[in-house]
Image (cartoon, rainbow, N blue to C red):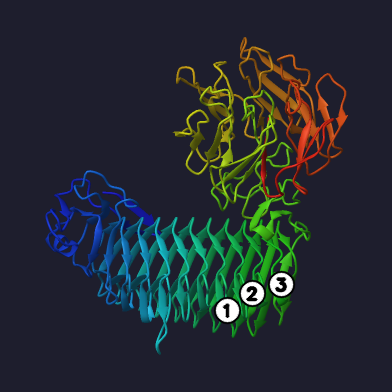
Amino acid sequence: MKKILIAGCILVLTAAAARSAVIRVNPLGGHYPTIQQAIDNALPGDEIQVAKGVYYEHLLISGKSNLVIKGGFKEDFSVRNPDLFVTEINGSGSGHVVHVRNSPAITLDGFKITNGNEYNGGGVYAIAGASSQTGLALYSCTITGNVAADGAGGGVYAYANSSGLVAVDLVGNNITNNNAVHLGSWGLGGGICFYAQDANSRITARLEKNTIRSNQATMGGGGAHFENYGGAIIELQLIDNTFESNSATDGGGICIQSAYSSSISMTLERCKVYGNTASNYGGGIYSHCDHTSQVTLTHRNNLFVDNSAVNFGGGVHALAGSNSTILYNNTNETFSNNSATYGGGIRLQANTSARVTFSLKNSVLWGNSASADRDISLYEQSATAQASASYCCLGDVYAGGGASFISDGTLIWVDPGFVDPAAGNYRLSNDSPLIDRADPSSANRNTVDDAYRPWDGGYEGEPRGDIGAYEYLPRYTFAKTDYDADGLTDIVVFRPAQGKWIIRNSLNGDREEISWGREGDIPVPGDYDHGGRCDVAVFRPSQGKWIVRLSETGDRQEIFFGRPGDIPVPHDYDADGRTDIAVFRPSSGKWSIKYSSNGSRLDLNFGYGTDYPVPADYDGDQKADIAVFRPSIGRWFIRRSLDQIRDVFDFGTNGDVPVPFDSDNNGRVEAAVFRPQDGTWQVRNQNPVTFGRSGDIPLPGNYVDAAERPAFFRPSNGSWYILNSPTIAWGMQSDFPIAR
């Protein structure tokens, strides 16, 4: 039996391995014509499979346990694909669509749940009371168009009272366009509401990889509302979720309220909170506790942008009153372009013997707007409000009414150097002052888009993280980028926000655009099909997946090779004319190569985690050699494929960017570095050339003739500069340049 531990409680998520039966639902030829009939006749451990179609039902699951209910099946149940074979449960505009009561380990997977209308939980309603338990898992469901009329939880509602325990697991769902409407009583949690009351009642929940978008609540929590009182406990883990364009009076994205000796703890990690609005407090998140309660919030690697509140806290507003406490710990956050009257980024307030303690590390608060106190605003009244910050980039801070702000000498008070905030790109540009400036003792946690952290983006030989939610990733291109088969390097940019490749063919200057990949992918072009042309390809770190568009046929090829944190190093390692898939793993210094010639695999430890991989054909045998550059001491280590002898030599210094290339067209690549400090290119055993400046991205290649020459992309003006050649405008500041 599969179990997951959430905040100290064990939630049984899936049925026992040995299920007693598979029950099929299809009005045209299943065991039962309705889902409810299947539920009523199911035993613990059964799996209910539901064929595609629209089912006008109100499901009641009461006193059951260990049931898995799956939608998305073809009519004959031969294939399951919830995206293709949509299985809709429709509430016909009244009542709960799904009602789960006192039933542990219930799973719904792959359904569209819509058109419910009830006081609480128009879409899904889960309740546990009188010392009972309910466990509900919703996987890959679309929950949309539901209403909580004068109650709470338009999309999903979970309620625990009288010592009841509710455990909720929401993974991979789309919760959109639900509404909690105030008609005189409530209007909480347009998308989601969890509510616990009475001592010994508890809700534990995990929300992961959900999209919570365009939900509305008249009162609190447009996206989600979490509330308890009377000694109840709520424990939450929110990981890899998106809260977008939700709206409410308080807490456009999320609202948290705790009162009367209760407690709420929430971990928010790798979440994107943007475009949410509040007509009062907390555009992104509003947290409030009162009457001896406590709220504990832990934030790591989150993005808060474009949120707004009419009054306090465009990004976040935290308010503690009446002997209550809010403990807020933030690490690697980015707050920008949020707005409010007071505290455009963050507003912290404590009243009446309350306490708010706020800790900020490795974070950016810049470019937020307010009538006063743009980035951080603190205020206390007969209470204590205290904030501390280290290794952060801040705009301005206001502390009033006796509130205190504690800082040290690690703060940065200059523009963080976002790539293109006007276009919504808050990644760090290559000359950002935040690269390699995080606390060196910080734990290694992945970024908001689940990329590995830390990278040594400053080429200083030290794997130190960056400040903010994103980590600057150096540009790696190892295989030749010739898309028109003329033997010359083509100028190419990858536009992550659109997943678009924009290619300038060197043969005739024509423009070609190809949509391939998405934000967070790493471009890995190469000739994977031996067609003589470079193929468009990306490596998706979060999945360890290579996605290649074969230029000969246009076919899509997907290969799993690597894992998050690996550096892709594609090259031709076996001289068969095809690019081999390969990765370098900084955590262990291991190279893994999948040879295209025979499908075999090589795993070899060569280098340290602080080294930069620089594979190239240094010995002229037409095979790429495994090699690393150690920036801390300017040392090169090359494993020659010709004879497996290791070459070691010093060339370069701390801060140099390794750019090996064949400058004299002799078939052997030379060690070379670009020195941003003075814009010089230094090739081993050759005279240096001054060409470029700090902020330029070096990309040597044979753009003009057979010999490779220095070249760079200047993000500030979107132009390419090739030595002894005209400047070419191609791309924009937020683009990822690709050339070799």
Q: Check disc 3 and give the amino acid type.
A: Arg
Question: Disc 3 designates what residue?
Answer: 374
Q: Considering the numbered disc 1 on the image, is that residue within a helix, a strand or a loop?
A: strand
Q: Is residue 41 left or right of residue 169?
A: left
Q: Considering the numbered disc 2 on the image, is that residue within a helix, a strand or a loop?
A: strand
Question: Disc 2 designates what residue?
Answer: 347
Q: Between residues 658 and 734, which one lies in front from this camera angle? A: 734
User: With respect to residue 354, does 425 lie above or below?
Assistant: above
Q: Where is residue 587 shown, x and y percent of the image? A: 57, 35
How many numbered circles does the render carry?
Answer: 3
Q: Between residues 160 and 544, which one lies in front from this camera angle? A: 544
**Lower sequence index among marks 1 and 3:** 1
Q: Between residues 716 and 565, which one lies in front from this camera angle? A: 716
**Lower sequence index among marks 2 and 3:** 2
Foreground tag (2 vs 1): 1
Q: Check disc 2 and give the amino acid type.
A: Arg
Quadrant in the rendering for residue 155: bottom left
The answer to the question of whether label 1 and label 3 lie on touching residues, with beta carbons closer than 8 A, is no
Q: Is residue 412 left or right of residue 426?
A: right
Q: Where is residue 247 shown, x and y percent of the image? A: 51, 74
